[in-house]
Structure formats: C-alpha cells, structure tokens
Image (tube, helix red, strand yellow):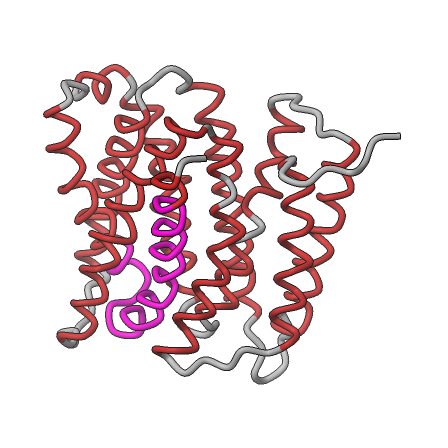
Amino acid sequence: MKSSDLLDLGILAALWGASFMFMRVAAPEFGPVALAALRVIGASLLLMPLLVLRGQAGELRRHWFRLLVVGLANSTLPFMLFTYAALSISAGMASIFNAATPLFGAVIAWLWLRDRPTRSGVLGLAIGFGGVLWMAWDRASFQPGGSPWAVLACLGAPLLYGISASYTKRFLSGVPSLAVAAGSLLAAALLLVVPAVIWWPPVPPSASAWGAALVLAVACTAVAYVLFFRLIANVGPARTIAVTFLIPAFAMLWGRVFLGEVLTWHMVAGCAVILLGTALATGAVRLPGR
C-alpha cells in the first residue's frame, strides 16, 4: 500500500470516527429524521455534479430501483438509527458497535451468497459476536440508566450495512462505484425529504448544531465516500476494510477530547475483542496452518 493510500485510509477513519461525535452534537436539536435527511441531501448535492462530470449519470436511470434499495438499507435507515442512538450513547460506544459491520456482512454473505467463511472466519464470527454481546449486556438493561433501544439501534444499523453489502454485490456488480455512492445517497435524500418536513424540529437549531450537520454531510459523508471508493479502486476491498479497525479509536479520541466522554477499560477491552473477531472474519488475520 502506497503512502498516499495510507494517508487516505487515515483520513477516512478520522472522518468516519468524527461522524459519531457530530451526531452527538446535532442529534438533540435536529432529531434522528431531520439530521439524517440533512446528511444525505448535502452529500448527494456534492456528489451528483461529480457524477455528471464523469459522464456516469445514465447509470442512475438504468439501476434506479436497486439504487433505491441500497439507499434505504445503506443510508436512510442506518443514519437514522445511529442518530437516534446518539441521543443516549457516547460516540465511542456507538463506533464500537459499528465495528461489527463486517461480522454481520460475513454472516449475510454466507447465508445469502453462499460465501462460506474459512476456519479462521468462523472463529472470528464467534469471537466478534461474543464481544458485541458483552458490550451490549449492561447497556441493553431495561433498568433505569440503561439504553436498550439505543443498543438495538446500534445493532440494527450494522445489520442493514451487511444486507446492503451483499445486495450490492449481488445486483450492482460492475456498476461504477461513484454511481452507486451518489445514486444511493440521492435515493436516500428523496426518501427522507417528506419525513424531514413532517418531523422538522419545532425549535430552530443552534448555529453549532447546524455546523455539526454541515460537517457531517460534507466531510463525513460526501468526502468520505469519495475516499472510500478511491481506496477500493486503488488497493481493493480487502485492504480497504482495514478502516473498520481504526474508526473506534478515532471516535473514542474525538469524543474524549471534544465532548469529554469517559473512556473505560470495559470499552477498550470490548473494542479489542470485536476487532479481533472482525480481523479473523474478514481474513485480515488468519490462524496458522496445520
């Protein structure tokens, strides 16, 4: 991997890690629906001109229904779920649950695409899901102070990401990656316009909330998508997935520095277990041969 690719990987992890912090800032004032809508509308407005300049706008017409499905499963619902979770769960904790995305993706690919995991992959799935259950155990308590629905939202979003990944591989292979990114974000924006108007906050959000929403749309979504698909083109999806290992570290760092969030050994240990399972499940780390 070239130094420029490593730089892209680091920037991408920093941006996606920061997205959890900006959701924490803006979610209380905008609410899950309006903030998710602003995120995808802003990102699609930036990516659509780039798609037109590359002469790939015709892909949207040819694959509109499949892009609509991807937009629903990869942006509309997950963004709302993570924004809802941000109302009661720290940025670092939400990012740790997000690190389980490759685990869900591996299971769904196994069941749907018959993409059978290796011996290391099966062990990784077991370890990774064990780590997720461990992290969610206390947080999912329905006792006072627990965050059961937020935890379920944090688990539902990676599940949807996994479904979207297999759906994209099954039905959109060969479609330019920028067309998939811009088209799915445009579809998500169209799906969220009316709900955002209905659930627009009655009290005007503050300047800081608007600033967080703007950065979330421009940097953490539009720019991040461009970096993500550029990495896939340059180094392949297997190496690009390494960004998953870095996102929780950045999210916990930004949350600690800018929001004063508490970083516990429970979080660090749970994150390590999930990432170990993810590394095994995705093939980044393999068991030694017989």
281 vs 179, left or right, is right
68 vs 168, left or right, is left
**Residue at the image position 25 percent from the left and 45 percent from the top:** 223
**Residue at the image position 41 percent from the left and 83 percent from the top:** 260
- All told, the count of numbered labels is 0
Q: Residue furthest right?
A: 290
141 is higher (above) or lower (below) than 286: below
- Residue 5 image position (x, y, % from top left): 38, 39
Q: How would you classify the magenta stretch by its main secondary structure?
A: helix
Q: Nearer the viewer, residue 231 or 46?
A: 231
Quarter occupied by the N terminus: top left
- Residue 67 image position (x, y, % from top left): 32, 28
**Residue at the image position 30 percent from the left and 21 percent from the top:** 176
Dividing the picture into quadrants, the one containing residue 159 is top right
Quarter occupied by the C terminus: top right
Span highlighted in magenta in the image: 7-36
- Residue 175 image position (x, y, % from top left): 33, 18
Dividing the picture into quadrants, the one containing residue 222 is top left
- Residue 54 image position (x, y, % from top left): 15, 22
Dividing the picture into quadrants, the one containing residue 204 is bottom left
Residue 3 in magenta stretch: no
**Residue at the image position 42 percent from the left and 57 percent from the top:** 81
Q: Residue furthest front?
A: 3
62 is higher (above) or lower (below) than 136: above
48 is higher (above) or lower (below) than 95: above
99 vs 91, left or right, is right
Residue 19 in magenta stretch: yes
